[in-house]
Image (cartoon, helix red, strand yellow):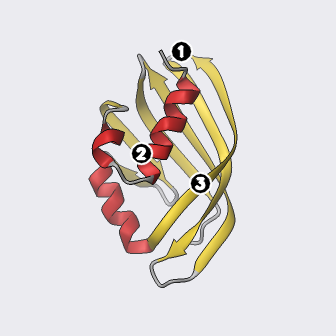
């Protein structure tokens, strides 16, 4: 069985490839996502549609993962930088991000995102 960190990393790579069907398999029922600006999502299609309005592409460079036990499962923090292109063609690189996941019974329960991208 994969560790919580391995699970998160594999999910993030699958999501980055926009393989929504494969990414969905990592998610627990009731999975929620909170992005900067308090943007809340419950489905990957909804998030992909919203992101397509802002970005041509977004990728992550992983710097480190921190994993800790919590009362409601395992919490995994992922730190790194983003690079890609906005929808208008402007590129960006070196944008800091932190992702926080809760993992229970081998599934992702929630995902919270912080980054320095302009809104």
Q: Secondary structure at mark 3?
A: strand
- Counting from the top left corner in percent of width and height, residue 92 is at 63, 73
Contact check, label 1 and label 2, Cβ < 8 Å: no
Check residue 71 in the rendering and tell me which mark sits there, or answer none: 1
Check residue 109 in the rendering and tell me which mark sits there, or answer none: none
Determine the CA span between mark 2 and mark 3. Answer: 17 Å
Residue occupying the point 52% across, 57% down: 36
- Check the image and report above or below for 70 versus 117: above
Determine the CA span between mark 1 and mark 3. Answer: 29 Å
Using a 10 Å C-alpha cutoff, classify the residue at mark 1 as few (fewer than 14 neighbours), some (14 to 19) or many (20 or more). Answer: few
Q: Quadrant of residue 14?
A: top left
Q: Nearer the viewer, mark 2 or mark 3?
A: 3
Q: Can residue 68 be seen from the camera position used here? A: yes
Q: Nearer the viewer, mark 1 or mark 2?
A: 2
Residue occupying the point 56% across, 38% down: 100
Q: Which residue is mark 3?
A: 60
Q: Can residue 43 be seen from the camera position used here? A: no
Q: Quadrant of residue 116?
A: bottom right
Q: Which residue is mark 2?
A: 33
Q: Nearer the viewer, mark 1 or mark 3?
A: 3
- Counting from the top left corner in percent of width and height, residue 12 is at 49, 44
């Amino acid at each position: 069985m994969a560790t919580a960190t391995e699970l998160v990393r594999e999910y993030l790579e699958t999501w980055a490839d926009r393989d929504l069907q494969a990414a969905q398999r990592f998610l627990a029922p009731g999975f929620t996502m909170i992005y900067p600006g308090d943007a809340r999502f419950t489905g990957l299609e909804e998030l992909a549609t919203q992101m397509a309005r802002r970005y041509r592409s977004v990728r992550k460079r992983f710097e480190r993962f921190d994993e800790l036990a919590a009362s409601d499962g395992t919490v995994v923090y992922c730190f790194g930088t983003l690079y890609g292109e906005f929808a208008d063609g402007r590129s960006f690189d070196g944008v800091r991000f932190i992702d926080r996941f809760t993992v229970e019974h081998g599934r992702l329960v929630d995902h919270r995102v912080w980054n320095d991208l302009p809104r």
